[in-house]
Image: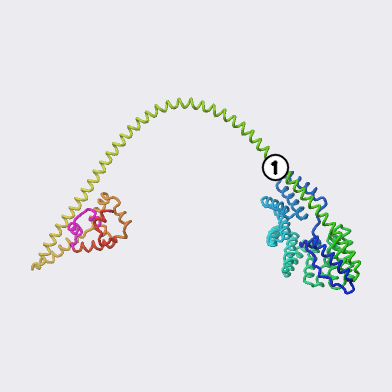
Amino acid sequence: MHTGRAKKHSPSPILPRMTLLAVWILSLSCVFIQTTFGQKPERNIPASPQNSDSLLIGLKANYNSAVGKNNDVEAAGFLQQIGRLLFISGHYPQSLDYLLQAEKIFRSKGQQKMLAVNLNMLGELYYRTRRPQLARKQFDEALAIYQNLGQESGKAEIYGRIGHLYEKREMYDSAFYFQRKALQSYQLDRHPGGAAKIYENIGSIYEDLEKYDSAYFYFNKAYALNAQTHNPRAQVEVVNNLGDVLRKTGKFREGLTYSFQSLKLAQTSGERYQISSAYNDISKAYNLLARNDSAFHYLTLSRSLLNDIYSEESNKQLALLQTLYEIEKKDNEIEQLTQARRIDTLISIATGIVVVLVIVVAALIISRQRLKIRNEQKLRAQHKQVYEAQNQLMEVELRNKQLEEEHLKQQLETKTQELSSYTLHVIRKNQLLEDLRAKLDEMIKDDKRDQRKQIKALSEQIGEGLQDDQHWEEFRGIFEQVHQSFFDRLQQQTGPLTANDLRLIALIKMNLTSTDIATLLGISQDSLRVIRHRLRKKLNLAAGDNLSAYIQSI
């Protein structure tokens, strides 16, 4: 629901019959009020409650009692009330501090309804301190909570406040939209008092837009609902608004009638701000009717009442600030005393614990020293036995390692001999087969055609025997036992290699001559040179690098 709207009055035309003295007096009075007190007080800001300092003391005492009972939700409620009291009194920074403390507790305890009320207060506080974006954020969160709770009146109040934010920014379409949503929620909840306030808000928007007929229509609807609910406090402002609209449309006497009615209602309800505002409106009406003496009289009454109000408010605020300062000072002293007592208690407990610990430690030290002497004597004897046993074990382990090394050397020598014997056997076999094939080739060249075909088949069979790979895996197994992990290291340093490449590399690793290698592979020396050249390329060797030296280094 929109609150805190300052009425906007169009400048009153000065009639030609008004004397220069009256003009000067009225102008001087207006300037005095504006310069002395700043902007005109907003009509529906609640005045500071009577004895706000004593009320603050009572709320603080209730808060301390709730804290003593560990009732966090009740304590947060009192924090919220203190924040509201400080807000009404105009102490916005202090109010913000208490409201934020209350919000933190409400959130942690899941008190959604109380949180929404607190967010509503924070939004209005941010609006009053000219931070509309923060105000809108609080209103939006409060609106979401009310929507989840299904509380139409809560939603309506937030809609009204958001509409007022848009009105102050002169975004009237949005202002109308939210005020009408507020009206709809109040009507769903059957809340005539809230609906009356929204009608008044809508009328004020039309008044800002200088659409006075529409403004008068909605003010009248608000008037009727307030009369129905017997709400004289709300009726004061509505009647005053009706008088403003009539005065702005040239109906000065009718407007004056409403202003006097507003004055009577304000005096009945004791609304001093409204009384001052009614005096001011009556003064304007008399001015427009060229009754300058009456205009000056009521303007003087308005100014005098404003002086009294601001003086009292200043005294109340000073008293409240003094009370707040004394409360905070007292809280600090209590906290310091409590802290000092805690420290003294802790020191006493710590001292007792230390004395006990010293006695216990001293007894333990003496006992441990005696035990230590006995244990040391036992340990010396045990260490001596362990040392002798360790020496014996080390000697046995050393002998075992020596035997193991000798065994490994013998195995290596055996494998090396096997590899050499196997290689020599293959070389001899291949040489024999090569000699046989050479003789057979000579016999093929002979003219004995009846033997040529059989001899040729035999020669091809010997050639296949030279290329046979059945012994290669046996050779590779023995080779890897002698040269462990050689092929793994080779693959890490080079790219993919074929089985023939690996066979040639293994033979080079064994330091065999080119003749022996060619014989083992069953190829000519020229073919061997070509194969070695291709292998150099695969191993990415430079022109001056030695292939055999490179393979031996792996």
Task: Give the structural element (helix, strand or loop) at label 1.
Answer: helix
Q: Position of residue 539 (x, y in %)?
A: 29, 60
Q: Is residue 520 left or right of residue 25?
A: left
- Name the quarter where the N terminus is drawn: bottom right
Q: Main secondary structure of the magenta part?
A: helix
Highlighted range, magenta: 505-525
From the viewer's side, name the closer residue of 18 and 547: 18
Which quarter of the figure has residue 348?
A: top right
| Residue located beneath label 1 in the image | 335
Report if residue 204 is visible in the image.
yes
Identify the residue at image location x=87%, y=58%.
269
Residue 218 appears at what percent x and percent y?
Answer: 81, 68
| In magenta stretch: residue 400 | no
Residue at the image point whose x is 25% and y is 60% from the top: 544
Q: Is residue 229 left or right of residue 122?
A: right
Horizontal and vertical percent for residue 456?
A: 14, 65
* Relative vertical location of residue 460 with respect to residue 57 in this rendering, above or below: below
**Residue at 20% from the left image edge and 55% from the top image edge:** 512
Residue 230 visible in the picture: no
Residue 17, by quadrant, is bottom right
Residue 520 shown in magenta = yes
Residue 524 versus residue 348 in the image, above or below: below
Q: Nearer the viewer, residue 4 or 27?
A: 27
Q: Position of residue 217 (x, y in %)?
A: 82, 70
